[in-house]
Image: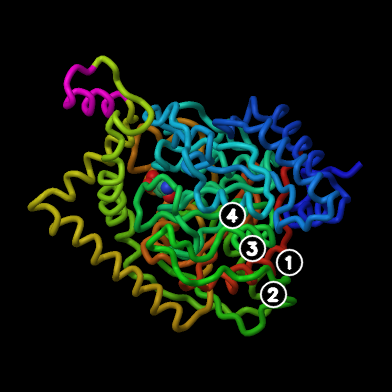
């Protein structure tokens, strides 16, 4: 019998379209795995089994009636729980939104549905996408499918774990400072952060609006390209949406002759885990063997990435999260007796400690007298970081770097020290600051059997090139596979 959950999303869609596999059988195969593995992995905050099976049966009927099915025919997809799925709770991993039912679909949700994907559920995340381990979720701890003692990364830890453990064919997450690429590296899957503006943010609960991007977690690069081709492209409902269309899915190139790769010297530093360094350098050898040339490049403002991100992101978050006031959405503290108390008690009890820390940081950085010293200065540093990339992309086509300084860490290892947690994103934040395209690919396993990731970064709207280079790599060095 065919093992449906081992098929790629692309292959499954094809099989459903030509009648080899029924969409209902595909959905059932995934729900069987969810039932078996979810008690340990805990990737989902909500599983939408009934609606998914109904949707799958409808697709099968439509196909029998001669209808042409969409690009994701019968493909089970999971959504990070900060993406709106109409009629289902959107909690953002926060007590604040417990009970909040989405009144509409996010643009990405709508596009997935239109392509005949089957939505299987909503995945766990760090509260309001703030964190690097998913330990900041108000509800549960998601474990890493490769080692249950380790975190899956974050903030899209549930989506990364679900894609890795084959609890869905692929999933969507959001990346503000690394929240797709870092958990993708920790869980051994492909994680794509598209260029800012390529994917509509309509229906994504905003964290830091100038940095947030939605992207897919997949088990193959082709699937990342397929997912992007469905969710990407202009959307009038998002004023920052670009006019650019996403690239069409194209075949893997035979070689990478003529490709110029840059290794940023600021990314190969003290504190980079030797196993991570070794596997990234191994990946570079693969690129060379495919015909690419490699030079060193410099991104001199990398050292300011974390400091400036932790001004900009909290500033935007403090403004975005002001809407959670106990009146409009979800949770309200009923012991309040005045309006002021409604705000105070609701926000006091509804938000967790990391979210409060960010709101305080951001409110301080934006206050009169400090705005110039902090926020405006951080924005200027951001421009310098974007210029670093522009300079480097004059000489190279793609930058190759580690995704994370270390492999997945253990639960509790970094919770006592927020700054240690923040450092997990030192290599991913620069791409959000510059708004360019980047992805993480699995490039090996550590001695303890944990996945290691390599990051590829391309200039804005160079997704086609990025994905094509990644496909060549995947063909030359197949990704490690989970043993179960
Ligand atoms: N870990 C980073 C943070 O906590 C990035 C989160 C994200 O990309 N959503 O802000």
State the extent of the magenta-drawn residues as a range: 336-349
> Do callouts 1 and 2 mark residues in contact (Cβ within 8 Å)?
yes
**Sequence-wise first label, 3 or 4:** 4
Q: Residue furthest right?
A: 1
Relative to residue 473, is residue 179 drawn left or right? left
Residue denoted by label 1: 476
The answer for how far apart the CA atoms under marks 3 and 2 are is 24 Å
Dividing the image into 4 quarters, which one contains the C terminus? top right
Mark 3 residue CB less than 8 A from any atom of ligand 1: no
Image quarter for residue 420?
top left
Q: CA distance from mark 3 to mark 1?
A: 18 Å
| Residue picked out by circle 3 | 225
Q: Are marks 4 and 1 in contact (CB under 8 Å)?
A: no
* Residue hosting label 2: 289
Instruction: Establish if 13 lies above or below 262.
Output: above
Which of pointers 4 and 1 lies earlier in the amino acid sequence?
A: 4
Residue at x 76% of width, y 31% of height: 32
Provide the secondary structure element on which disc 3 rests: helix
- Residue occupying the point 53% across, 39% down: 86
Pinpoint residue 224: horizontal percent, then vertical percent: 63, 59
The residue carrying mark 4 is 111
């Amino acid at each position: 019998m065919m093992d449906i959950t081992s098929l790629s999303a692309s292959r499954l869609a094809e099989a459903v379209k030509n009648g080899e596999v029924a969409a209902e059988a595909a959905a059932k195969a995934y729900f069987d795995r969810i039932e078996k593995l979810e008690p340990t992995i805990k990737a989902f905050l909500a599983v939408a089994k009934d609606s998914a099976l109904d949707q799958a049966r409808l697709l099968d009927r439509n196909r029998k009636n001669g209808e042409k099915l969409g690009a994701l025919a019968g493909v089970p997809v999971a959504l990070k729980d900060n993406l709106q799925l109409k009629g289902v709770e959107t909690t953002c991993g926060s007590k604040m939104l417990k009970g909040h039912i989405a009144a509409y679909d996010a643009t990405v949700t709508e596009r997935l549905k239109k392509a005949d994907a089957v939505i299987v559920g909503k995945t766990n995340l760090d509260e309001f996408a703030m964190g690097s381990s998913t330990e900041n979720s108000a509800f549960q701890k998601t474990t890493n499918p490769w080692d249950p003692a380790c975190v899956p990364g974050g903030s899209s830890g549930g989506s990364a774990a679900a894609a890795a453990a084959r609890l869905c064919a692929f999933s969507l997450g959001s990346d503000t400072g690394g929240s797709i690429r870092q958990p993708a590296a920790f869980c051994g899957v492909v994680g794509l952060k598209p260029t800012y503006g390529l994917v509509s943010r309509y229906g994504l609960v905003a964290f830091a609006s100038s940095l947030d991007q939605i992207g897919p977690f997949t088990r193959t690069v082709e699937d990342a390209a397929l997912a992007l081709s469905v969710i990407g492209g202009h959307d009038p409902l998002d004023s920052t949406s670009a006019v650019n269309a996403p690239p069409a899915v194209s075949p893997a190139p035979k070689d990478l002759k003529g490709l110029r790769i840059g290794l940023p010297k600021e990314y190969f530093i003290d504190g980079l885990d030797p196993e991570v360094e070794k596997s990234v350098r191994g990946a570079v050898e693969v690129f060379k063997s495919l015909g690419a040339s490699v030079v060193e490049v410099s991104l001199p403002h990398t050292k300011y990435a974390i400091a400036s991100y932790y001004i900009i992101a909290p500033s935007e978050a403090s403004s975005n999260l002001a809407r959670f006031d106990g009146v409009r959405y979800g949770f309200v503290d009923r012991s309040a007796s005045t309006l002021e108390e409604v705000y105070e008690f609701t926000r006091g009890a509804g938000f967790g400690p990391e979210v409060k820390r960010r709101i305080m940081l951001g409110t301080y950085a934006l206050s009169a007298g400090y705005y110039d010293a902090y926020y405006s200065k951080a924005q200027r540093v951001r421009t310098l970081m974007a210029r670093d990339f522009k300079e480097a992309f004059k000489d190279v086509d793609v930058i190759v770097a580690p995704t994370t300084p270390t492999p997945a860490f253990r639960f509790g290892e970094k919770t006592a020290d927020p700054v240690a947690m923040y450092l997990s994103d030192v290599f991913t934040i620069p791409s959000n600051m510059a708004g360019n395209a980047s992805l993480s690919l699995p490039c090996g396993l550590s001695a303890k059997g944990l996945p290691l990731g390599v990051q590829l970064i391309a200039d804005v709207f160079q997704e086609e090139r990025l994905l094509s280079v990644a496909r060549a790599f995947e063909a030359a060095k197949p990704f490690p596979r989970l043993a179960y």
